[in-house]
Amino acid sequence: MAKNILLCCVLAVACAIAVASDPAPLQDFCVADLNSQVLVNGFACLDPKLVTADNFFLSGLDKPGNVSNPQGSAITPATVGQIPGLNTLGISLVRIDFAPWGIVSPHTHPRATEILVVIEGTLLVGFVTSNPDNKLITKVLQKGDVFVFPEGLIHFQQNVGPGNAFSFSGLSSQNPGVILVPDTVFGSTPHIATDVLAKAFQVDKSIVDQIEAKF
């Protein structure tokens, strides 16, 4: 009986470890066939005989993005959508450009941890822990500094220097996804009911209407 209980415990731990880890690739690569109609978790593989170096290549990350927008920032992605060779490899990259005082709104990546390195400028960055603490972890970064945003937590970046700034971020997913909190809450289609948001934020409905009009 004791041996059976021990065996069950060992199997339970083994199953938990297996479930907690992403499966490793079963071949050298699986270049995404972005035109395939096959629905899988990720993308179907392109025939290896058709794969070229260009499937693993992207140029242009030396060029700044257009920051002439209300947020004063621009994201240039290098994910599986731009580099099909990233499929199944669990990694991607983005360049983030900032105008003076530009921001990347509070957001979360549902499928990735992010590690950011400042290339030029000074950035205020931070993330908020989950309920019930909701603790803000924040720091001012200078050129060459690195900061990590844990997977799934709401975080932000702001340029607090006098000039333009830019950074690179590595993400632990080929397709990390992004949920911008303001856009999601106030710009959903269709809108979340005004009375729900008014009660959630403890404000008058007219204020919710004003904010929603901007999205």
Image (cartoon, rainbow, N blue to C red):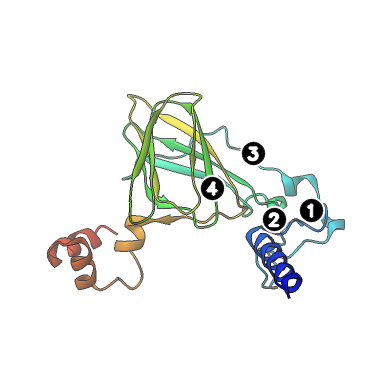
Q: Amino acid at mark 1?
A: Phe
Badge 4: residue crowd in 10 Å (few <14, some 14–19, many ≥20):
many
Q: Mark 2 — residue?
A: 87
Write the residue at 23% across / 67% down. 197
Residue 193's x, y, as percent?
25, 73
Distance in Å between CA atoms under marks 1 and 4? 22 Å
Quarter containing the N terminus: bottom right
For the residue pair 23 and 175, the one nearer the viewer reads as 23
Q: Amino acid at mark 2?
A: Asn
Write the residue at 83% across / 56% down. 27
Q: Mark 3 — residue?
A: 59
Q: Mark 4 — residue?
A: 113
Quarter containing the C terminus: bottom left
Labelled disc at residue 162: none
Q: Quadrant of residue 10?
A: bottom right
Q: Earlier in the sequence, mark 3 or mark 4?
A: 3
Q: Amino acid at mark 4?
A: Thr
Distance in Å between CA atoms under marks 4 and 2? 17 Å
Camera sees residue 152: yes
Classify mark 2: helix, strand or loop. Answer: loop
Q: Earlier in the sequence, mark 4 or mark 2?
A: 2
Residue 184's x, y, as percent?
36, 61
Q: Earlier in the sequence, mark 3 or mark 2?
A: 3
Write the residue at 64% across / 48% down. 91
Q: Mark 1 — residue?
A: 29
Classify mark 1: helix, strand or loop. Answer: loop
Residue 110's x, y, as percent?
50, 57
Q: Amino acid at mark 3?
A: Ser
Classify mark 3: helix, strand or loop. Answer: loop
Left or right of 151 on screen, residue 15: right
